[in-house]
Amino acid sequence: MKTRNQSGFTLIELVVVIALLGILAAFAIPRFASLEREARAATTQGLSGSVRSAAAMAHGLFLATGSTPVNMEGNAIVIVNGYPDAATIADTLADSTGFTVSTAAGATTFAKNGASGTCEVVYAEAVVNNPPSIGVDVTGC
């Protein structure tokens, strides 16, 4: 009779590896959970920069043509006091995916989807001799 040598991991070795993986996961999960909030805040900050740039581009186009509405990427952008009005500012953006856009009383709000609180960009129309107001609130991202 021949004897065979069996090779493999013992039960104790497998339990130790599983315990180590559990400990590592306990440290990693809270780190990744906070990254989601930071990603929403960064996306919202990025959108605010896009809104500022789009308003400046529409303003420059208005100054160059001298007429309203101006045409940006096939969209008619209505100009108020030299800048886009609240109803058409969203049309100046190439993409606002991930945000819910709502307009009321001379202001447009871009609210981040999936946020537990206030995570938004607010565009308020320009008043005479002043640029538009663009506010960012990332406290509830």
Image: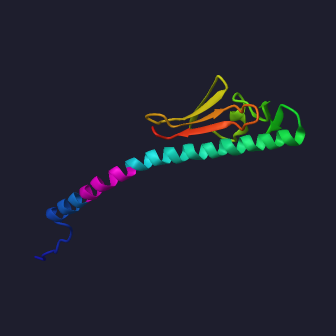
**Quadrant housing residue 125:** top right
For the rendered model, the colour scheme is rainbow
Q: Quadrant of the N terminus?
A: bottom left
Q: Which residues are magenta?
A: 21-32
Q: Residue furthest left?
A: 1
> Does residue 97 appear in the picture of this structure?
no
Front in this rendered view, residue 110 or 127 = 127
How many tags in the picture? 0
Would residue 71 appear left or right of 94 to someone viewing this image?
A: right
- The image position of residue 101, as x and y in percent, is 61, 30
Would residue 107 appear left or right of 116 to someone viewing this image?
A: right
Front in this rendered view, residue 71 or 1 = 71
Whether residue 25 is in magenta: the answer is yes
- The image position of residue 57, as x and y in percent, is 77, 44
- The image position of residue 29, as x and y in percent, is 33, 51
Q: Is residue 67 above or below residue 8?
A: above
Q: Is residue 36 above or below residue 104?
A: below
Front in this rendered view, residue 67 or 19 = 67
Magenta stretch, main secondary structure class: helix
Give the residue drawn at x 72%, y 33%: 126
Give the residue drawn at x 59%, y 38%: 135
- The image position of residue 59, as x and y in percent, is 79, 40
